Image: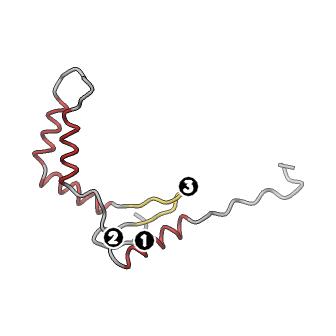
């Protein structure tokens, strides 16, 4: 995570960093909470999914564990809440780092490209 303060501080921190074609959103604290929820509250569902994947059977176009994964996703949150003024702070940070980037100047006339 960047040393800069996150754009959103809670309930889950979200940091925004520029990349050449846009931005990355660092949602580490959300993913940590999600993983903890999965292993503490939904361990049985995870075990059932793993058991389905271990069964040796020819693939018939249907994966029984797909329904289990869908049910699990319905049971856990996949949306990151962002409240009040932090919505604007996140938007401002994304605008700030995703804005147009200057293109390096072409070589002066008479240079190697001329």
Q: Using the image, determine if residue 87 lies above or below residue 43.
A: below
Separation of disc 1 and disc 3 at Cα? 18 Å
Q: Which x, y percent locates residue 24?
A: 45, 59
Q: Which x, y percent locates residue 68?
A: 18, 41
Separation of disc 2 and disc 3 at Cα? 24 Å
- Please tell me the numbered disc located at residue 21: 3
Contact, mark 2 vs mark 1 (Cβ under 8 Å): yes
Separation of disc 2 and disc 1 at Cα? 9 Å
Question: Which residue is denoted by mark 2 in the rendering?
Answer: 82
Q: Using the image, determine if residue 53 lies above or below residue 44.
A: above
Q: Is residue 101 left or right of residue 83?
A: right
First in sequence, mark 1 or 3: give its number. 3
Q: Using the image, determine if residue 57 lies above or below residue 106.
A: above
Q: Using the image, determine if residue 40 lies above or below residue 99.
A: above
Question: Which residue is denoted by mark 1 in the rendering?
Answer: 90
Q: Quadrant of residue 36?
A: bottom left
Question: What is the quadrant of the N terminus in the image?
Answer: bottom left
Q: Is residue 54 left or right of residue 28?
A: left
């Amino acid at each position: 995570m960047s040393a800069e303060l996150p754009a959103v501080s809670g309930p889950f921190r979200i940091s925004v960093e520029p990349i050449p074609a846009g931005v990355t959103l660092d949602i580490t604290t959300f993913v940590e909470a999600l993983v903890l929820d999965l292993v503490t509250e939904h361990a049985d569902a995870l075990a059932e999914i793993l058991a389905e994947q271990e069964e040796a059977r020819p693939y018939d176009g249907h994966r029984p564990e797909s329904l289990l994964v869908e049910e699990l996703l319905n049971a856990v949150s996949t949306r990151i809440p962002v409240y009040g003024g932090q919505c604007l702070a996140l938007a401002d940070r994304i605008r700030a780092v995703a804005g147009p980037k200057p293109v390096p100047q072409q070589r002066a006339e008479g240079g190697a490209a001329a």
